[in-house]
Image (tube, helix red, strand yellow):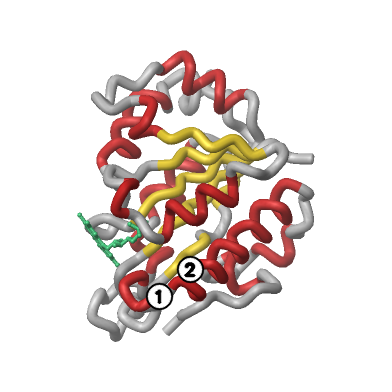
Amino acid sequence: MSRILILFAHPALEKSRIHKELISRAKNLESVYVHDLYEVYPELDIDLSREQELLLSHDIILLQHPFYWYSAPAIIKQWLDLVLEHGWAYGSTGKALHSKQMMNVISCGGSREVYQREGKNRFTVPELLAPFNQTAHLCGMEYLPPFVIHGTHRLNDTDITLSALQYESLLVALRDERISEDERKGIEYINDILPIPSAIQS
Ligand SMILES: Cc1cc2nc3c(=O)[nH]c(=O)nc-3n(C[C@H](O)[C@H](O)[C@H](O)COP(=O)(O)O)c2cc1C
């Protein structure tokens, strides 16, 4: 059974519709640890040793956050800048994270349609997530296709419940190592191979 660490970042959780629901499901699962970065570090004063210990004791690292300005809320950047030290996470002696897996779990106001080359946002979500993909690669981790919830402003309560169920099924499948290397190669989103469909994709 894999141990999953969710590095969760939402600067206004009290206003959240999507992530509030996803997190409440994730918290109930065995072998899944939810680490709410804004709750633990409201002043962004990240405890580097604690974070590195957490990374060492987990196999799969999820960065869960709303998509903000085609990227992540500020604390994720602060976390990456401080925690992934040279000589520990990367560099000739930096092998602490080798063979772990990393993935983004994001929600976007925009639809899947606008995140196409010919769409309003001109780039696909995986293209915009390239810095995370390459960071994982540099640190010797496998970067998994992202879990993405689109069109958040149009989702009703039933849609959100469906997305949360889909997320729960992903966490269980990752934890129980039920997503094979063949299945996860070459797909745009991990959602696309999950049995429960996403609420609104276009
Ligand atoms: C500061 C800010 C920046 C945002 N940037 C984007 C963006 O670049 N692309 C996008 O699709 N949605 C963007 N959104 C919309 C959020 O991603 C969306 O409201 C959020 O995912 C909904 O999740 P929640 O209900 O958990 O807050 C932005 C929202 C805020 C407040």
36 in relation to 52, above or below: below
Pointer 2 residue: 160
- In which of the image's four quarters is ligand 1 placed? bottom left
Q: How many residues crowd mark 2 within 10 Å: few (<14), some (14–19), many (20+)? A: many
Q: How many residues crowd mark 1 within 10 Å: few (<14), some (14–19), many (20+)? A: some
Q: Which of the two labelled residues, at mark 2 and mark 1, occupies the earlier sequence position? A: 1
Instruction: Estimate the x, y position of residue 100 in percent, counting from the top left.
Output: 63, 38
Residue at 63% from the left image edge and 57% from the top image edge: 168
* Left or right, 125 with reference to 164: left
Q: Secondary structure at mark 2?
A: helix
Q: Quadrant of the N terminus?
A: top right
Q: Dots 2 and 1: beta carbons under 8 Å?
A: yes
Regarding residue 95, the answer to whether it shows in the image is no
Amino acid on which the number 2 mark rests in the picture: Ile
Judging depth in this view, the residue of 137 and 156 nearest the camera is 156
Q: Disc 2 and disc 1: Cα gap in Å?
A: 6 Å
Instruction: Estimate the x, y position of residue 24 in percent, counting from the top left.
Output: 53, 48
Pointer 1 residue: 155
Note whether ligand 1 is within 8 Å of mark 1: no
Q: Secondary structure at mark 1?
A: loop
Note whether ligand 1 is within 8 Å of mark 2: no
* Left or right, 58 with reference to 44: right
Task: Give residue 27's quadrant in the image.
Answer: top right
Instruction: Estimate the x, y position of residue 170 in percent, counting from the top left.
Output: 65, 58
142 in relation to 51, above or below: below
Residue at 38% from the left image edge and 57% from the top image edge: 129
Q: Quadrant of the C terminus?
A: bottom left
Judging depth in this view, the residue of 21 and 73 nearest the camera is 21
